Amino acid sequence: MSLRAATGVGLIAVLLWSSLATLTVLAKGIPPFQLEAMSFALGALIGLVYLVIRPQARRDLRQLTWPAVLLGVGGLLGYHFFYFLSLSSAPPLEANLINYLWPLLIVLFSALLPGERGKLRWNHLAGALLALGGAVLAMMQGRIHGADFSGAVLGYAAALAAALTWSAYSVLSRLFARVPSSAVAIYCAATSFAAVLAHVTAEQTVWPLSATQWMSIILMGLGPIGIAFYVWDYGCKHGDLRVLGAAAYFAPLLSSALLIAFGLAEATPILWIAASAITVGALLASKDLLSSRSANAPSISAKPSAV
């Protein structure tokens, strides 16, 4: 497969991730850990089927280490718990925008890794401030329109925790670059199992009552929590990492547009300004990724399948 085609495969992941907020809102009413358990079970099924039909993929798993497993399961379980909690506790559009600070945080945290090229520059700091301003504007949207801002604080905090969890996990995954991508199926299966234990301990089971809820969970498990991990991994290994990295920063706008298209959020000038500020800030911070000087430099994967 050509470089352009492989890059196109990787870009499918960005489109799939953009649907996660909409599917999560449509599945509202299902406890966060239960939703994780159900969706990750489907995501793991995709990878496990691949392991069954590809003996070489099973042999590659010999390189898997316990620290990598702990990081993979902790990143997947922690991020999606905070993400689902944020969308069920705060206005979904605002919470979603705050969550999408993770591409920017990946750029900033990558400077802390040993051996990484370069230190923080003006564009990193300027991009961080711009994206932070967009996040604050998104949070203030509820107060500006007279909504109960205090009641959504938990959701906003969970969205920020999700962004921090995903970005930290993504950067730390670079320390386990030799672990094969087929390990993602194991991460998903272990995450689903851990979510079941957490659900039994802390939540009351709520089975989906409508076809919309069932369909949302199935699509979630097969798409943004399933296929997306695997196509992203292929794109990272065989496509243009600079294009894939930059494309991840457009997910906030695509995600917000889907929420509005499904009538799950209201399009207002303030929210579009906030979304634009976060996206432009992230692009500014990642300017080096798009420069000719970084053409041969390693890139940070924004999702766990690049582990």
Image: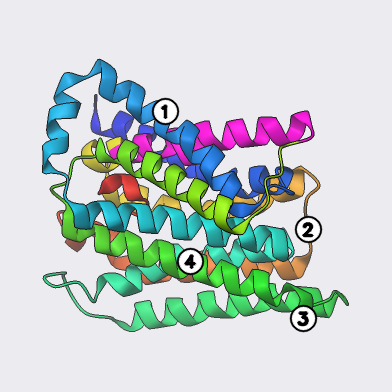
In the image, 19 versus 5, the foreground residue is: 19
Circle 2 residue? 267
- Asked where in the image residue 183 lies, by quadrant, the reply is top left
Residue 102 at x, y = what percent? 45, 64
Residue type highlighted by circle 2: Ala
The chief SS type of the magenta part is helix
The residue identified by callout 1 is 45
For the residues labelled 3 and 4, the Cα–Cα distance comes to 21 Å
Q: Distance between the residues labelled 2 and 3?
A: 22 Å
Q: Tell which tag, 2 or 1, sits nearer the viewer.
A: 1
Q: Mark 3 points at which residue?
A: 150
Q: In which quarter of the image is residue 45?
A: top left
Query: Any magenta on residue 232?
Result: yes
Q: Quadrant of the N terminus?
A: top left
What residue lies at 37% left-to-right and 51% top-to-bottom?
303
Q: Tell me, yes or no, if residue 78 can be seen here.
A: yes
Mark 1 and mark 3: span between their CA atoms?
Answer: 40 Å
Secondary structure under the numbered disc 4 in the rendered image: helix
Q: The disc labelled 1 sits on which kind of residue?
A: Leu
